[in-house]
């Protein structure tokens, strides 16, 4: 399961719940150091980089049938960053929820 925003208040609760349920969590967040401290190994991904907008980028980090949850919510930043974290992620095949 690809979880965007896994270091936020809602995201970390989802991540812990999924992990306790035995789900392999591919955690991604704005603060990868925080994810490492709570036991996740996030892929290096900059959502403003178009290379991360391809299925090939994410397939290298998990099963090709991986589903995603977007719990990321930028409070500030550019329009491009907001689009990369919200609109693009919601259009990806297999995305089950957009929070």
Image: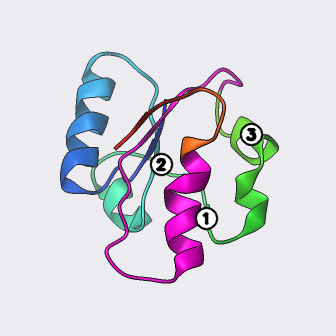
Label disc, if present, on residue 86 of the rendered structure: none
The residue that appears at 44% across and 83% down in the rendered structure is 77
Q: In this picture, which residue range is highlighted in magenta?
A: 63-89
Give the x, y percent position of residue 21.
Answer: 29, 16
Q: Which of the marked residues, 2 or 1, is nearer the chain's N terminus? A: 2
**Residues under labels 3 and 2: Cα distance?**
14 Å
Q: Which of the marked residues, 3 or 2, is nearer the chain's N terminus? A: 2
Name above or below for residue 78 compared with residue 66: below
> In the picture provided, is 90 more to the left or to the right than 6?
right
Query: Magenta stretch: residue 84 in it?
Result: yes
Label disc, if present, on residue 41 of the rendered structure: 2
Q: Residues within 10 Å of mark 3 (few under 14, many from 20)?
A: few
| Residue 18 picture quarter | top left
Query: Magenta stretch: residue 60 in it?
Result: no
**Secondary structure at numbered mark 1:** loop
Mark in front: 3 vs 2: 3
**Residues under labels 2 and 1: Cα distance?**
17 Å
Question: Badge 1 is on which residue?
Answer: 47
Mark in front: 3 vs 1: 1
Quadrant where the C terminus is found in the figure: top left
Q: Which of the marked residues, 3 or 1, is nearer the chain's N terminus? A: 1
Name above or below for residue 22 compared with residue 95: above
Label disc, if present, on residue 60 of the rendered structure: 3
């Amino acid at each position: 399961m690809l979880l965007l925003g896994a270091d936020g208040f809602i995201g970390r609760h989802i991540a812990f719940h999924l992990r306790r349920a035995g789900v392999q969590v591919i955690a991604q967040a704005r603060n990868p150091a925080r994810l490492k401290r709570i036991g996740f190994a996030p892929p290096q991904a900059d959502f403003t980089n178009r290379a991360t907008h391809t299925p090939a980028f994410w397939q290298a980090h998990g099963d090709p049938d991986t589903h995603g949850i977007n719990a990321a919510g930028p409070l500030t930043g550019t329009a491009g960053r907001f689009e990369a974290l919200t609109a693009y992620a919601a259009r990806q095949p297999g995305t089950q929820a957009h929070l």
